[in-house]
Amino acid sequence: MSTYTNGFTLKTLKIITKNDIINMCNLLNNRDEYINICKFLPEGIGGGGIIFNYKNAVNDNWYKSVRLQVNNGNTGGKWYWVNDNVINEWTDNNDIIFDKNVKFTIFLKSFHGAPVFTLEELKIWELCFNQIGIIKVGNYPTKKSLIDLDF
């Protein structure tokens, strides 16, 4: 089983910076649901995202990511180079990822045995997004769409 689907639509209430993305990762990293399972980092992917870095993956190929789709549609967003020093380089950095009042839809991916996304998990992400100035304006995906049996 895997997840390969749109998540939900979000809207920025303020300018979102590299530092906000680091804050989002830190909020997720400090959640009891994740604290001993994985660490979150900005993902080195063109459209931008946050990757789950599993601590004790059953399989080294586990892959799970929330793609921000920064460059899709008319968001006008920008995703910057991500390297091994991303935490230090992006902390306190005000380079703009999204302007204020931008809508974007996240895309959810989990492959190679990584846990599929759940609605409960997406609610955690929504709470963390809210804390950095991003709100949900669309519906959650259906439970069925979160599980792809054929992928």
Image: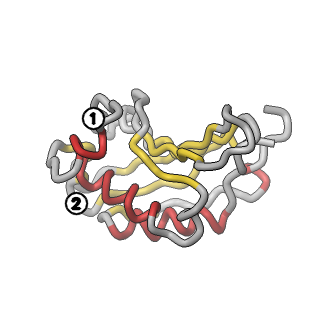
Where is the C terminus found, in terms of image quarters?
top right
Quadrant in the picture for residue 37: bottom right
Q: 58 or 150: which is nearer to us?
A: 58
* Coloring scheme used: secondary structure
Amino acid type shown at disc 1: Lys
**Pointer 1 and pointer 2: residues touching (CB < 8 Å)?**
no
Q: Nearer the viewer, residue 1 or 89?
A: 89
Question: Is 89 located above or below residue 26 in the figure?
Answer: above
Q: In the structure shown, which secondary structural element does the residue marked by tag 2 occupy?
A: loop
Judge whether 46 appears above or below 40 on screen. above
Q: Position of residue 96 (x, y in %)?
A: 19, 44
Mark 1: which secondary structure?
loop
Q: Quadrant of the N terminus?
A: top right
* Quadrant in the rendering for residue 20: bottom left
Label placed on residue 11: none
Q: Which residue is mark 2?
A: 14
Above or below 134: residue 148: above
Mark 1, residue position: 78
In the rendered image of this protein, does residue 68 appear above or below residue 100?
A: above
Name of the residue lying farthest toward the right: 149
Q: Nearer the viewer, residue 130 or 64?
A: 64
Local packing at callout 2 (Cα closer than 10 Å; few below 14, some 14-19, many 20+) is some
